Image: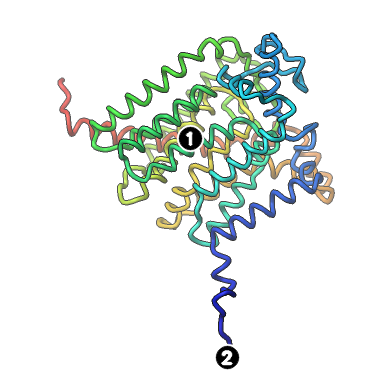
Amino acid sequence: MTTNLPFFPAPRRLLTPPVVFFLLVLAGYVGFVLLPVLRQWLGMAQSPMWFLDTHAVLAACDAVRAGLDPFQPNPLDVYHRPHVYSSWWFSLGRFGLTREDNFLVGGLWVMVFFAMVFALLRPRSYRAAVWYALLVLSPPVLLAVLRANNDLVIFVLLGTGVLVMRRATPWRLALFALSLTLATGLKYYPLVGGLALVLLRPPRLMHLTAGLTLLVAGLALTTVLGDLRRVGIPAPDGLYTLGTPVLFHELDWPPWAVLCAGAILLTGVATACWWRGWFVRLDNEKTDWRERVAFACGSAVLVGCFLAGSSYAYRLIFMLFLAPFVWRCAATTARIWPVLLVLGALWMDGIYCLVGNFPLSPSWLRAALNHPWCWRLISQPVIWTVMALLTASLFEMLRVAWADWRGKIPLVS
Protein backbone atom coordinates (compact mmCIF):
# COMPACT_ATOMS: atom_id res chain seq x y z
CA MET A 1 0.00 0.00 0.00
CA THR A 2 1.34 3.41 -1.00
CA THR A 3 0.26 6.87 -0.02
CA ASN A 4 1.07 10.23 -1.51
CA LEU A 5 2.36 12.61 1.12
CA PRO A 6 0.96 16.15 0.85
CA PHE A 7 4.40 17.59 0.14
CA PHE A 8 5.12 14.94 -2.53
CA PRO A 9 2.30 15.41 -5.09
CA ALA A 10 1.67 12.70 -7.63
CA PRO A 11 3.76 13.11 -10.81
CA ARG A 12 0.71 13.27 -13.05
CA ARG A 13 -0.68 16.18 -11.06
CA LEU A 14 2.64 17.97 -11.45
CA LEU A 15 2.84 17.39 -15.20
CA THR A 16 -0.32 19.18 -16.15
CA PRO A 17 -0.75 20.19 -19.82
CA PRO A 18 0.45 23.79 -19.20
CA VAL A 19 3.53 22.48 -17.39
CA VAL A 20 4.29 20.03 -20.20
CA PHE A 21 3.88 22.87 -22.71
CA PHE A 22 6.29 25.05 -20.73
CA LEU A 23 8.89 22.29 -20.36
CA LEU A 24 8.79 21.41 -24.07
CA VAL A 25 9.25 25.06 -25.08
CA LEU A 26 12.01 25.53 -22.50
CA ALA A 27 13.88 22.42 -23.68
CA GLY A 28 13.55 23.46 -27.33
CA TYR A 29 14.91 26.95 -26.79
CA VAL A 30 17.74 25.75 -24.54
CA GLY A 31 18.79 23.45 -27.38
CA PHE A 32 18.43 26.27 -29.91
CA VAL A 33 20.70 28.51 -27.82
CA LEU A 34 23.31 25.95 -26.77
CA LEU A 35 23.57 23.92 -30.00
CA PRO A 36 24.71 26.08 -32.93
CA VAL A 37 24.32 23.06 -35.22
CA LEU A 38 20.53 23.39 -34.85
CA ARG A 39 20.66 26.96 -36.08
CA GLN A 40 22.85 25.81 -38.96
CA TRP A 41 20.44 23.04 -39.95
CA LEU A 42 17.56 25.53 -39.83
CA GLY A 43 19.42 28.01 -42.03
CA MET A 44 19.82 30.64 -39.28
CA ALA A 45 23.57 30.43 -38.69
CA GLN A 46 24.44 33.41 -40.91
CA SER A 47 23.51 36.00 -38.29
CA PRO A 48 26.68 37.52 -36.75
CA MET A 49 25.01 38.27 -33.43
CA TRP A 50 21.93 37.72 -31.32
CA PHE A 51 19.20 40.37 -31.28
CA LEU A 52 20.23 41.87 -34.61
CA ASP A 53 17.00 43.82 -35.10
CA THR A 54 17.06 45.35 -31.63
CA HIS A 55 20.55 46.58 -32.49
CA ALA A 56 19.17 48.30 -35.61
CA VAL A 57 16.54 50.17 -33.58
CA LEU A 58 19.04 51.25 -30.92
CA ALA A 59 21.53 52.25 -33.63
CA ALA A 60 18.85 54.49 -35.14
CA CYS A 61 18.34 56.09 -31.71
CA ASP A 62 22.10 56.65 -31.50
CA ALA A 63 22.04 58.20 -34.96
CA VAL A 64 19.36 60.67 -33.88
CA ARG A 65 21.42 61.56 -30.83
CA ALA A 66 24.49 62.08 -33.04
CA GLY A 67 22.60 64.37 -35.44
CA LEU A 68 22.47 61.85 -38.30
CA ASP A 69 19.46 61.03 -40.45
CA PRO A 70 18.33 57.59 -39.22
CA PHE A 71 16.28 57.00 -42.38
CA GLN A 72 19.48 56.92 -44.43
CA PRO A 73 22.05 54.08 -44.36
CA ASN A 74 23.23 54.15 -40.77
CA PRO A 75 27.00 53.83 -40.18
CA LEU A 76 26.32 52.97 -36.53
CA ASP A 77 24.48 49.76 -37.43
CA VAL A 78 26.19 46.43 -38.07
CA TYR A 79 24.87 46.29 -41.66
CA HIS A 80 24.45 50.08 -42.10
CA ARG A 81 20.70 49.53 -42.24
CA PRO A 82 18.42 52.60 -42.38
CA HIS A 83 15.54 52.90 -39.96
CA VAL A 84 12.44 51.39 -41.58
CA TYR A 85 9.92 51.92 -38.78
CA SER A 86 8.21 54.96 -37.31
CA SER A 87 9.95 57.67 -35.33
CA TRP A 88 8.08 56.52 -32.21
CA TRP A 89 10.92 54.04 -31.64
CA PHE A 90 13.31 56.94 -31.02
CA SER A 91 11.70 57.29 -27.59
CA LEU A 92 14.03 54.48 -26.47
CA GLY A 93 16.91 56.92 -26.84
CA ARG A 94 15.20 59.39 -24.53
CA PHE A 95 15.52 56.79 -21.76
CA GLY A 96 19.27 56.71 -22.29
CA LEU A 97 19.31 53.36 -24.10
CA THR A 98 22.11 52.83 -26.62
CA ARG A 99 23.60 50.00 -28.66
CA GLU A 100 25.49 48.98 -25.54
CA ASP A 101 22.13 47.97 -24.05
CA ASN A 102 21.26 45.69 -26.97
CA PHE A 103 21.31 42.46 -25.00
CA LEU A 104 19.27 44.02 -22.21
CA VAL A 105 16.59 45.42 -24.53
CA GLY A 106 16.47 42.37 -26.79
CA GLY A 107 16.33 40.00 -23.84
CA LEU A 108 13.52 42.02 -22.28
CA TRP A 109 11.51 41.91 -25.53
CA VAL A 110 11.97 38.15 -25.76
CA MET A 111 10.98 37.53 -22.14
CA VAL A 112 7.85 39.68 -22.39
CA PHE A 113 6.96 37.91 -25.63
CA PHE A 114 7.16 34.50 -23.97
CA ALA A 115 5.14 35.75 -21.02
CA MET A 116 2.40 36.76 -23.45
CA VAL A 117 2.64 33.42 -25.30
CA PHE A 118 2.11 31.45 -22.09
CA ALA A 119 -0.74 33.77 -21.10
CA LEU A 120 -2.55 33.29 -24.43
CA LEU A 121 -1.87 29.59 -24.95
CA ARG A 122 -3.31 27.54 -22.08
CA PRO A 123 -3.50 23.92 -23.25
CA ARG A 124 -6.18 21.77 -21.63
CA SER A 125 -4.88 18.45 -22.94
CA TYR A 126 -1.49 16.89 -23.56
CA ARG A 127 -2.10 16.78 -27.30
CA ALA A 128 -2.80 20.50 -27.30
CA ALA A 129 0.37 21.06 -25.24
CA VAL A 130 2.49 19.24 -27.82
CA TRP A 131 0.85 21.06 -30.74
CA TYR A 132 1.27 24.45 -29.08
CA ALA A 133 4.92 23.64 -28.38
CA LEU A 134 5.51 22.75 -32.04
CA LEU A 135 4.06 26.13 -33.03
CA VAL A 136 6.17 28.09 -30.54
CA LEU A 137 9.28 26.12 -31.58
CA SER A 138 8.63 26.67 -35.29
CA PRO A 139 11.36 28.38 -37.35
CA PRO A 140 9.52 31.72 -37.86
CA VAL A 141 9.15 32.13 -34.09
CA LEU A 142 12.75 31.02 -33.54
CA LEU A 143 13.88 33.59 -36.10
CA ALA A 144 11.91 36.37 -34.39
CA VAL A 145 13.50 35.45 -31.06
CA LEU A 146 16.99 35.12 -32.55
CA ARG A 147 16.79 38.59 -34.07
CA ALA A 148 14.60 40.09 -31.30
CA ASN A 149 12.54 41.66 -34.04
CA ASN A 150 10.18 44.39 -32.92
CA ASP A 151 7.26 42.30 -34.15
CA LEU A 152 7.63 40.74 -30.69
CA VAL A 153 6.62 44.09 -29.19
CA ILE A 154 3.67 44.36 -31.57
CA PHE A 155 2.64 40.82 -30.61
CA VAL A 156 2.69 41.79 -26.93
CA LEU A 157 0.70 44.98 -27.50
CA LEU A 158 -2.00 43.30 -29.57
CA GLY A 159 -1.91 40.29 -27.23
CA THR A 160 -2.57 42.59 -24.28
CA GLY A 161 -5.66 43.93 -26.02
CA VAL A 162 -6.82 40.41 -26.81
CA LEU A 163 -6.03 39.06 -23.35
CA VAL A 164 -8.37 41.46 -21.57
CA MET A 165 -11.27 40.72 -23.91
CA ARG A 166 -13.02 38.18 -21.72
CA ARG A 167 -16.11 40.34 -22.04
CA ALA A 168 -16.95 43.40 -24.10
CA THR A 169 -17.01 45.90 -21.23
CA PRO A 170 -16.15 49.57 -21.84
CA TRP A 171 -12.75 49.56 -20.13
CA ARG A 172 -11.72 46.32 -21.87
CA LEU A 173 -12.67 47.76 -25.24
CA ALA A 174 -10.78 50.94 -24.38
CA LEU A 175 -7.67 48.93 -23.51
CA PHE A 176 -7.93 47.02 -26.78
CA ALA A 177 -8.20 50.34 -28.64
CA LEU A 178 -5.17 51.71 -26.78
CA SER A 179 -3.10 48.61 -27.56
CA LEU A 180 -4.09 48.77 -31.23
CA THR A 181 -3.25 52.48 -31.40
CA LEU A 182 0.21 52.05 -29.88
CA ALA A 183 0.99 49.10 -32.14
CA THR A 184 -0.18 51.02 -35.22
CA GLY A 185 1.96 54.03 -34.37
CA LEU A 186 5.00 51.81 -33.95
CA LYS A 187 4.73 49.65 -37.05
CA TYR A 188 1.83 50.74 -39.29
CA TYR A 189 0.30 47.36 -40.20
CA PRO A 190 -1.47 46.51 -36.87
CA LEU A 191 -4.30 48.89 -37.84
CA VAL A 192 -6.02 46.06 -39.73
CA GLY A 193 -6.24 44.08 -36.48
CA GLY A 194 -9.10 46.37 -35.49
CA LEU A 195 -11.26 44.36 -37.87
CA ALA A 196 -11.75 41.94 -34.96
CA LEU A 197 -14.20 44.42 -33.43
CA VAL A 198 -16.69 43.46 -36.14
CA LEU A 199 -17.49 40.53 -33.84
CA LEU A 200 -19.11 42.88 -31.33
CA ARG A 201 -22.85 42.68 -30.86
CA PRO A 202 -25.35 44.33 -30.94
CA PRO A 203 -24.60 45.92 -34.32
CA ARG A 204 -24.89 49.49 -33.01
CA LEU A 205 -22.18 48.76 -30.42
CA MET A 206 -20.05 47.16 -33.11
CA HIS A 207 -20.26 50.16 -35.43
CA LEU A 208 -19.65 52.68 -32.66
CA THR A 209 -16.72 50.84 -31.06
CA ALA A 210 -15.06 49.72 -34.28
CA GLY A 211 -15.48 53.18 -35.80
CA LEU A 212 -14.01 55.02 -32.81
CA THR A 213 -11.15 52.54 -32.42
CA LEU A 214 -10.16 52.66 -36.08
CA LEU A 215 -10.48 56.45 -36.03
CA VAL A 216 -8.09 56.81 -33.08
CA ALA A 217 -5.64 54.25 -34.48
CA GLY A 218 -5.92 55.91 -37.87
CA LEU A 219 -5.03 59.27 -36.32
CA ALA A 220 -1.97 57.64 -34.78
CA LEU A 221 -1.07 56.35 -38.23
CA THR A 222 -1.37 59.83 -39.74
CA THR A 223 1.23 61.11 -37.27
CA VAL A 224 3.82 58.74 -38.75
CA LEU A 225 2.83 58.91 -42.42
CA GLY A 226 5.80 61.16 -43.02
CA ASP A 227 8.06 58.42 -41.66
CA LEU A 228 6.32 55.86 -43.84
CA ARG A 229 7.03 57.95 -46.95
CA ARG A 230 10.69 58.26 -46.04
CA VAL A 231 11.44 54.63 -45.27
CA GLY A 232 12.58 52.28 -47.97
CA ILE A 233 11.37 48.94 -46.69
CA PRO A 234 13.55 46.29 -48.38
CA ALA A 235 11.81 43.32 -49.97
CA PRO A 236 13.40 40.18 -48.50
CA ASP A 237 14.34 37.34 -50.80
CA GLY A 238 15.01 33.65 -50.33
CA LEU A 239 13.78 31.40 -47.54
CA TYR A 240 11.75 32.51 -44.55
CA THR A 241 9.81 35.10 -46.51
CA LEU A 242 6.08 35.72 -46.61
CA GLY A 243 3.80 37.50 -49.06
CA THR A 244 2.03 37.17 -52.38
CA PRO A 245 5.15 38.27 -54.37
CA VAL A 246 6.99 35.09 -53.34
CA LEU A 247 4.83 33.03 -55.70
CA PHE A 248 5.62 35.34 -58.63
CA HIS A 249 9.33 35.64 -57.87
CA GLU A 250 10.47 34.08 -61.14
CA LEU A 251 8.33 36.44 -63.23
CA ASP A 252 9.83 39.70 -64.43
CA TRP A 253 6.80 41.79 -63.50
CA PRO A 254 6.79 45.29 -61.99
CA PRO A 255 5.97 45.40 -58.25
CA TRP A 256 2.51 46.91 -58.75
CA ALA A 257 1.56 44.12 -61.17
CA VAL A 258 2.78 41.47 -58.72
CA LEU A 259 0.74 42.96 -55.88
CA CYS A 260 -2.38 43.24 -58.05
CA ALA A 261 -2.01 39.69 -59.31
CA GLY A 262 -1.55 38.43 -55.76
CA ALA A 263 -4.61 40.29 -54.50
CA ILE A 264 -6.78 39.03 -57.38
CA LEU A 265 -5.60 35.45 -56.96
CA LEU A 266 -6.07 35.42 -53.18
CA THR A 267 -9.50 37.03 -53.45
CA GLY A 268 -10.57 34.51 -56.05
CA VAL A 269 -9.37 31.48 -54.11
CA ALA A 270 -10.83 32.84 -50.86
CA THR A 271 -14.19 33.47 -52.54
CA ALA A 272 -14.23 29.90 -53.83
CA CYS A 273 -13.44 28.64 -50.31
CA TRP A 274 -16.19 30.80 -48.84
CA TRP A 275 -18.67 29.57 -51.46
CA ARG A 276 -17.86 25.96 -50.59
CA GLY A 277 -18.11 26.63 -46.85
CA TRP A 278 -14.40 26.15 -46.19
CA PHE A 279 -13.86 28.69 -43.45
CA VAL A 280 -13.88 29.07 -39.69
CA ARG A 281 -17.12 30.40 -38.27
CA LEU A 282 -16.70 33.17 -35.73
CA ASP A 283 -20.35 34.03 -35.04
CA ASN A 284 -21.06 31.17 -32.60
CA GLU A 285 -21.61 33.01 -29.33
CA LYS A 286 -21.32 29.76 -27.37
CA THR A 287 -17.60 29.64 -28.10
CA ASP A 288 -14.98 31.59 -26.16
CA TRP A 289 -15.25 35.31 -26.97
CA ARG A 290 -11.56 36.03 -26.40
CA GLU A 291 -10.47 33.17 -28.65
CA ARG A 292 -12.71 34.46 -31.44
CA VAL A 293 -11.28 37.98 -31.08
CA ALA A 294 -7.72 36.59 -31.12
CA PHE A 295 -8.47 34.56 -34.26
CA ALA A 296 -10.02 37.52 -36.07
CA CYS A 297 -7.23 39.90 -35.06
CA GLY A 298 -4.48 37.46 -36.05
CA SER A 299 -6.21 36.60 -39.33
CA ALA A 300 -6.60 40.26 -40.31
CA VAL A 301 -2.94 41.02 -39.54
CA LEU A 302 -1.66 37.96 -41.42
CA VAL A 303 -3.83 38.49 -44.50
CA GLY A 304 -3.09 42.21 -44.56
CA CYS A 305 0.67 41.65 -44.40
CA PHE A 306 0.46 38.82 -46.94
CA LEU A 307 -1.25 41.15 -49.43
CA ALA A 308 0.94 44.18 -48.71
CA GLY A 309 4.14 42.61 -50.10
CA SER A 310 7.11 40.54 -49.05
CA SER A 311 8.20 40.42 -45.43
CA TYR A 312 10.25 38.11 -43.31
CA ALA A 313 8.50 34.98 -42.11
CA TYR A 314 8.71 36.01 -38.46
CA ARG A 315 5.47 37.88 -39.19
CA LEU A 316 3.93 34.39 -38.85
CA ILE A 317 4.24 34.67 -35.07
CA PHE A 318 0.66 35.98 -35.27
CA MET A 319 -0.36 32.43 -36.15
CA LEU A 320 -0.16 31.89 -32.40
CA PHE A 321 -3.24 34.11 -32.08
CA LEU A 322 -5.15 31.56 -34.14
CA ALA A 323 -4.02 28.49 -32.22
CA PRO A 324 -6.57 28.32 -29.33
CA PHE A 325 -9.64 28.69 -31.55
CA VAL A 326 -8.27 26.39 -34.26
CA TRP A 327 -7.59 23.68 -31.68
CA ARG A 328 -11.02 24.09 -30.08
CA CYS A 329 -12.75 23.86 -33.47
CA ALA A 330 -10.73 20.77 -34.38
CA ALA A 331 -11.60 19.13 -31.06
CA THR A 332 -15.34 19.80 -31.41
CA THR A 333 -15.70 18.97 -35.12
CA ALA A 334 -13.10 16.17 -35.33
CA ARG A 335 -11.53 17.95 -38.32
CA ILE A 336 -7.75 17.79 -38.08
CA TRP A 337 -6.90 19.59 -41.33
CA PRO A 338 -6.88 23.14 -39.84
CA VAL A 339 -4.41 21.95 -37.21
CA LEU A 340 -2.16 20.41 -39.86
CA LEU A 341 -2.38 23.45 -42.14
CA VAL A 342 -1.31 25.88 -39.41
CA LEU A 343 1.54 23.57 -38.44
CA GLY A 344 2.57 23.17 -42.07
CA ALA A 345 2.57 26.90 -42.74
CA LEU A 346 4.94 27.45 -39.83
CA TRP A 347 7.26 24.53 -40.57
CA MET A 348 7.49 24.29 -44.39
CA ASP A 349 10.66 26.36 -44.84
CA GLY A 350 12.18 24.82 -41.72
CA ILE A 351 11.63 21.32 -43.08
CA TYR A 352 13.26 22.39 -46.35
CA CYS A 353 16.34 23.61 -44.44
CA LEU A 354 16.49 20.54 -42.20
CA VAL A 355 16.32 18.14 -45.13
CA GLY A 356 18.83 20.13 -47.18
CA ASN A 357 21.34 20.65 -44.36
CA PHE A 358 21.04 17.38 -42.45
CA PRO A 359 24.22 15.34 -43.14
CA LEU A 360 22.36 12.05 -43.58
CA SER A 361 19.92 13.36 -46.18
CA PRO A 362 20.23 11.58 -49.56
CA SER A 363 22.36 13.51 -52.03
CA TRP A 364 19.72 13.30 -54.77
CA LEU A 365 17.15 14.89 -52.46
CA ARG A 366 19.47 17.74 -51.50
CA ALA A 367 20.30 18.29 -55.17
CA ALA A 368 16.60 18.54 -55.99
CA LEU A 369 16.01 21.02 -53.18
CA ASN A 370 18.82 23.24 -54.48
CA HIS A 371 16.31 24.55 -57.03
CA PRO A 372 14.26 27.17 -55.14
CA TRP A 373 11.47 27.11 -57.72
CA CYS A 374 10.96 23.43 -56.97
CA TRP A 375 10.46 24.15 -53.30
CA ARG A 376 8.09 27.03 -54.07
CA LEU A 377 5.86 24.63 -55.98
CA ILE A 378 5.64 22.54 -52.82
CA SER A 379 5.52 25.17 -50.08
CA GLN A 380 3.53 28.02 -51.62
CA PRO A 381 0.28 26.07 -52.02
CA VAL A 382 0.33 25.43 -48.25
CA ILE A 383 0.70 29.05 -47.19
CA TRP A 384 -1.72 30.25 -49.89
CA THR A 385 -4.30 27.71 -48.72
CA VAL A 386 -3.98 28.96 -45.15
CA MET A 387 -4.28 32.59 -46.21
CA ALA A 388 -7.27 31.81 -48.45
CA LEU A 389 -9.05 30.06 -45.58
CA LEU A 390 -8.33 32.96 -43.23
CA THR A 391 -9.60 35.41 -45.84
CA ALA A 392 -12.74 33.33 -46.35
CA SER A 393 -13.28 33.31 -42.57
CA LEU A 394 -13.03 37.11 -42.54
CA PHE A 395 -15.47 37.27 -45.47
CA GLU A 396 -17.99 35.22 -43.49
CA MET A 397 -17.45 37.35 -40.39
CA LEU A 398 -18.20 40.49 -42.40
CA ARG A 399 -21.20 38.86 -44.08
CA VAL A 400 -22.74 37.93 -40.73
CA ALA A 401 -22.10 41.44 -39.37
CA TRP A 402 -23.75 42.95 -42.44
CA ALA A 403 -26.75 40.62 -42.11
CA ASP A 404 -27.15 41.52 -38.45
CA TRP A 405 -26.94 45.22 -39.29
CA ARG A 406 -29.58 44.91 -42.02
CA GLY A 407 -31.82 43.11 -39.59
CA LYS A 408 -31.62 46.01 -37.15
CA ILE A 409 -31.75 48.92 -39.59
CA PRO A 410 -33.65 48.25 -42.84
CA LEU A 411 -31.92 49.58 -45.92
CA VAL A 412 -33.71 52.15 -48.05
CA SER A 413 -33.92 51.01 -51.65
- Across and down, in percent, residue 295 comes to 44, 41
Tell me the SS state at disc 2.
Answer: loop
Callout 1 crowding tier (Cα within 10 Å): few <14, some 14–19, many ≥20: many
Location of mark 1 (residue): 158
What kind of colouring is applied to the model shown?
Answer: rainbow
Location of mark 2 (residue): 1
Q: Is residue 171 above or below residue 185?
A: below
Q: Is residue 280 above or below residue 267?
A: below
Residue type highlighted by circle 2? Met
Residue in view at x 49 percent, y 47 percent: 120
- Across and down, in percent, residue 226 comes to 53, 10
Of all residues, the one furthest to the bottom in this rendering is 1
In this rendering, position of residue 171 left or right of residue 70? left
Residue type highlighted by circle 1? Leu
Say which quadrant the N terminus sits in. bottom right
Quadrant assignment, res 72: top right
- Across and down, in percent, residue 337 comes to 50, 50
Q: CA distance from mark 2 to mark 1?
A: 52 Å
